[in-house]
Amino acid sequence: MATIELDLLQGTLDLLVLKTLTWGPRHGYAVTAWIRQTTSQRLQIEEGALYTALHRMEKRGWLESEWGLSENNRKAKYYQLTTLGRKQLRAKTAVWTEYAGAVFTVLQTT
Amino acid sequence: MPRIPGIRRLLHIQRGGAGVDRAVDDELRFHFDMTMRELMANGMTPDQARAEAQRRFGNAQQTRERLAAIDRSVVERERRADWSSAFAQDLRYALRGIRLKPWFAGAVILTLGLGIGANATMFGIVDRLLFRPPNFLIAPNRSSRLYLVQSYRGDAKPESSMGYRRYLDLKEGTTSFDAMTPYYINVVAVGAGDGTRAVAVAASGADLWKMFDVKPVRGRFFTPEEDAPPAGTRVVVLSYAFWQTQFGGRTDAIGASLDVGPAKYTVIGVAPEGFNGFAAGSVAAFVPLSAQGGVDLGVRTKDPWYSTYNMTWFDTFARRKPGVSAEAASADLDHAYQQSYIKQLEGNPTQTRFDIARPHAFAGPVLEDRGPNEGSDAKVTTWLVGVAGVVLLIACANVANLLLARALKRRREIAVRIALGVSRGRLLMQLVTESLLLAAMGGVAGLVIAEWGGGVMRRVLLNRSDTGPSAFADPRLLLFAAALTVATGLLTGLAPVFQTGRGDVASALKAGSREGTVHRSRLRVGLLVAQAALSVVLLVGAGLFLRSLSNVQNVRMGYDVDRLLWVKLNARGVTSDSIEDVALRNRLVERAKSLPGVEHAARALSVPFWNTWGFSLFVAGIDSVDKLGDFTLQSATPEFFQTMGTRILRGRAFTSADGEHAPRVMVVGESMAKKIWPTQDAIGKCIRVDVDTMPCTTVIGIAEDVRRGSMSETQMHYYLPIDQFQRRSGGVFVRTHGPAAERAEEVRRALQTLMVGTSYVAVTPMSTIVASQIRPWKMGAAMFSIFGALALVLAAIGLYSVIAYNVTQRTHEMGVRVALGAQAQDVVGLIVREGLLIVLPGVALGAIIALVAGRWVAPLLFNVSPKDPPVLVGVIVTLVAVAVAASWIPALRASKVDPNVALRAD
């Protein structure tokens, strides 16, 4: 059971990060800030885990990174989706939606 | 991001350990700064903001390490990709080079192929003779062939041949061995009717099956009970190959009856494919030693084969128990042999005394040629391994030379690449890749040559009928060839690498071919000197072996080898008495003489090089004739001397009057007569044969000496009328009008008609028997000649390419010379002199090496001094002539330089 939860959590993190990057290249701080704001802090996600997800997905070739200048002129590492990353996002979204739907149906059953 | 090899280095992008850590730190620091800044903008104090940021982030240290680890693995992967793409690029580049210059590549591949092929061929043979344990042998390190040593006239020669009683004494008297078996290979006729084949049959104890990791493919192996003296059980285990060819691999072969030699055996099993026991060649069938002993040696009541010490015919193999050291086992064996010797003395007090014989035994290597009695084939082959190595060295020198010439031509290209920032390491990698690729192709060519050469060597020179495994299917040979390929690739690649590694970029870039200084590579000249020297060494070897071969072929044997056939009788399925035996042999002689192509025929007991008979001799007034040397005997009919072509020097040969009951007479060889009666005439003397109470045998004639035990010395030999000694034994010598080998089949067919039942005759030309004696010299002469010629051709090509290259470099200079009035012959002389200046030091060096090395090759030569002047002079003249010829062609070209063209070029 524990591993399934972890897999679920990790898959969910990947999904969130990938989704965030669909609006264009962002650095790590922007990704975490956006997720926190969008979820209105309802999801308690450690930011360290988000960074791990970023690096791991870069290794898998879903993301690529480049050093650039931030809004306040500081060196920052920008992440961007690759074609492979977009494909992953579509696939994961479909799986997650179906999964969530199934769980929801069960919970709605009276 | 597209991957451009080398781009990171060019852009100075940091990578690897420290770079990764710093990048992670930078990223995280940016994150914390931004978070704190946002929190403080919302009204937190710096301390609160830091605490909140850390809370949100989680374990920062752990995350930092995790991120760095991920990034490092990415970097590592990229580095590997860089490498393989660089290698692929080098490979493409090298392949393009080969496509663009196919002749150059072809020359290199062929040269290396010959070098590697020669070595792979020799390795295949030497591996078989000296290194590879027999197939399936369970513990090669613990297995041995047993040797017995006895001092005889001050000589202590190890002997592996022993008899059954001795074997039993050793087996029962030792505790160090867990398996011990006799092993004896006999070539006999197997099968019946048209299917009869003369094949090798192994006779052994049941322990044979314990020493090898083999299981019967069909049926079973024989047991110790089936190998019990006096006559064992007549059962036979077939080899896989024999089962396939003679029984078509049928299962009903088990239980079938098979003629092995004169007796019928029952087939009980089939051994796995490739199993030959301890034999080097292929074996067709395996029988219990006792069964064969019972058939071939008879079951006499007095002193039978299994209880006599006076008969030796097989080698013994044994396996030490695990944990027993070789020394301990040999000591144990030694003791057992000495006990056995004492037992033997008790039964036969005339045996050499213990303190004189000093018997001693040891466990030697399984392979005969590794042991104390190595054959001359093995000795010559070992030499040839060295020769093949020299050929490879020459081939490498040549290829290095060719690659060097090309590297010199590419100096500018390489300088440009260095100036553009290609690292020297990368450049070296590329050059080595190129030479390794060429070497790999050469290696494949070499294997093809080894496949062919190995077959030829085994068939023609070693006279082994066994077809070894294909060169491509022999893992040991493949491994050897691969190692050789890598070594030659590196060796040949290294020379140009030195050259380019040293290159001064600026001067190379500036210089055109019209530069004032001519690049004369000292390395190239050095390689040529070495090649010339090695060629001299090999050619001297070839000359010495050719002279030996010619000497050995022209030596007077004491009989006419080319005109003789030996007819051996093989009785099967018939019991005959002595009258029938004599009559049959006489009929064979008469029938042979009636053939049109036959001049003479005579019966004889023994065949030179095949078997010998000897007895103790007693002469009045001489203390011990035996101490004077080994005397061997032949018994024959009167026509024997005419048949063999052996001259009677004085006195007379036998006549038909010297019959069974006539006074005993003997003809002695010249050297024997001189040895026994140095100051007197031997004719008319009395000599007693076997024991000193025998009646006198009177010497009636003196014959010329014969060679029948070794090519290099004559034998002290005597002849008795066959009617007075072993009248029912032996075979027939036939003397033909022309070369005997051509008549062999005709004679065999004519004589076969006289044989009864399944008995048959085997006809062997005397030249075949002698050929195996001459083989070491033949092999040495052939291989040294082939390798020497190869070396000479390679050296000539090398010299030609260097001179030709120098001439192109100096086209300008030649143009100036011609313009200033130099004649064509001046220019030719200049260039040829240059060629000689390179070769002569090499020739001198080679001659010195040949003279020094001659000492070791001397024992293998036949009546030739290793310092034979004609050979040395001949080789030196040959080399000088070749050097002149090789520099002549480029010299002619230089002399035809048109000053107009040459001075305007470039």
Image (cartoon, helix red, strand yellow):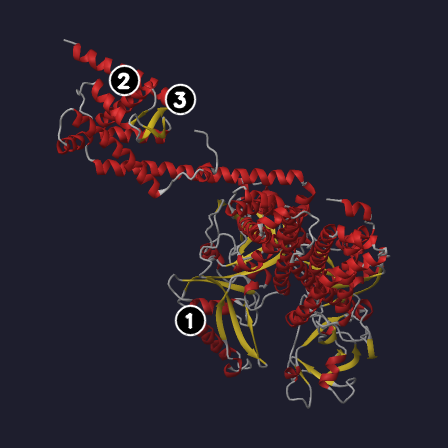
Q: Chain of mark 2?
A: A
Q: Which amino acid type is marked by label 1?
A: Asp
Q: Indicate whether B654 appears above or below B525.
A: below
Q: Indicate whether B95 appears above or below B31.
A: below
The label nearer to you, 2 versus 3, is 3
Near-viewer residue (B437 or B414) = B414
Labels 2 and 1 touching (C-beta < 8 A)? no
The residue labelled by disc 1 is B332
Labels 2 and 3 touching (C-beta < 8 A)? no
Q: Chain of mark 1?
A: B
Labels 3 and 1 touching (C-beta < 8 A)? no
Q: Indicate whether B813 appears above or below A28.
A: below
In the rendered image, residue B703, in percent from the top left (x then y), is placed at 79, 77
Distance (Cα) linking label 2 and label 1: 81 Å
Q: Which amino acid type is marked by label 2?
A: Trp
In the rendered image, residue B766, in percent from the top left (x then y), is placed at 75, 62
Mark 1 nearby-residue class (10 Å; few <14, some 14–19, many ≥20): some
The residue labelled by disc 2 is A96
Q: Which amino acid type is marked by label 3?
A: Thr
What secondary structure is marked by label 2? helix
The label nearer to you, 2 versus 1, is 2
